[in-house]
Each structure stands twice: as C-alpha cells, then as structure tokens.
Amino acid sequence: MFLGGQALIASSFLQGVRATTATIPAGAWFHVFEVQILGGGRIVGQFQDADGRVVDVLVLDEPEYEVYALIGTGEGIFSMRGTSGSFVAVLPDSGTYYLVFAHAAGFESSEQEVLVSYRLLGVEPVFLGVGLTMIVPGIASTGIGLRAKRAAAPALPVD
C-alpha cells in the first residue's frame, strides 16, 4: 500500500496526456471534460474536427460553466474557434474547471467528432488524496510487521 500510495502521489504531479474523441450531438449541445486542480496550473492541448468543421473551444471555471450550461454562451478563462489548433489556458486557483467543445455558429445541424488530446499541468487532487490515504495504512502495516518480526526472532545469548 505504501508503494502504491507513493505512485499515486507522483502521478498527481505528472499527469499523462488524455487523448479521446469529443462527440458534439446535433443541436444546441456541447461536450465537456471536467478537470480538478490543486493550487492552480495550466491545461494544454490540441484538437481537430474530424470533418474539418469549425468548433468553439472554451475553458471555464465553475461559476462560468453553470451560466454556460444554462444559456450556452460565455467567454470563460480561455476561448478560441477553429477546425483545429493548440491551446494553453492558465487555471489560476484550486478548483474544478471545464474544457468545453461546442458547435460554432452554423454547424449545429449535424453531429461533430472532435479529436482531442490534453494534459493538466499542476497537482490533481484526486490522485493526491487517494495516494495519501494509501500511504498511512502502508506505514502502519509495515510497523506492525516489523514489530511482529522482532517478537518472533529468537533472543541472542549474552556472553
């Protein structure tokens, strides 16, 4: 458990690239990726619409996302429009952020497939929390094991 906890803590600082497809259904819909960060950081990524159509890319904090989800508009921390591109958005504080892919004006009538890869640069609290909760029992069980080993060891004769 101790070693597994250390691995999770390390991975909370060194997240890998997440590559996936964001499917935006036809109509006034969007696709969202939720990310959590501890102490701020950045989200870095690339996107490409599979059919070369224009999409909107936004990074929103929690209050901005709540508004966006209700009315479908907003600027957020970062926004861009294109058929493909790279993005870097600064996430200023700890919290939950949303990477949103939406139809650009005029493309709402059909489903869009967007190839997405992104990486979170900062501390991801989920891995950190799970790692810490694994380390404590790992240390305790190691101590118990060492104590049991000492108790079971034969005493050395004294000359």
Image (cartoon, grey):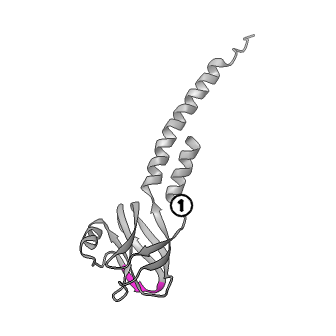
> Residue at image x 36%, y 66%?
97
Name the residue that disc number 1 marks.
14
Q: Nearer the viewer, residue 47 or 8?
A: 47
| Residue farthest toward the right in the current orientation of the protein | 159
Q: Nearer the viewer, residue 48 or 63?
A: 48
Q: Nearer the viewer, residue 54 or 44?
A: 54
Q: Quadrant of the N terminus?
A: top right
> Residue at image x 49%, y 79%?
47
Q: Can residue 91 be seen here?
A: no
On screen, residue 7 above or below 13: above
On screen, residue 18 above or below 87: above
Q: Which residues are magenta?
A: 79-84
> Residue at image x 63%, y 22%?
150
Q: Position of residue 52 (x, y in %)?
A: 48, 88
On screen, residue 132 above or below 110: above
Residue 33 forms part of the magenta stretch: no
Dot 1 lies on which element?
loop
Q: Magenta residues: mostly which secondary structure? A: strand
Quadrant hosting residue 91:
bottom left
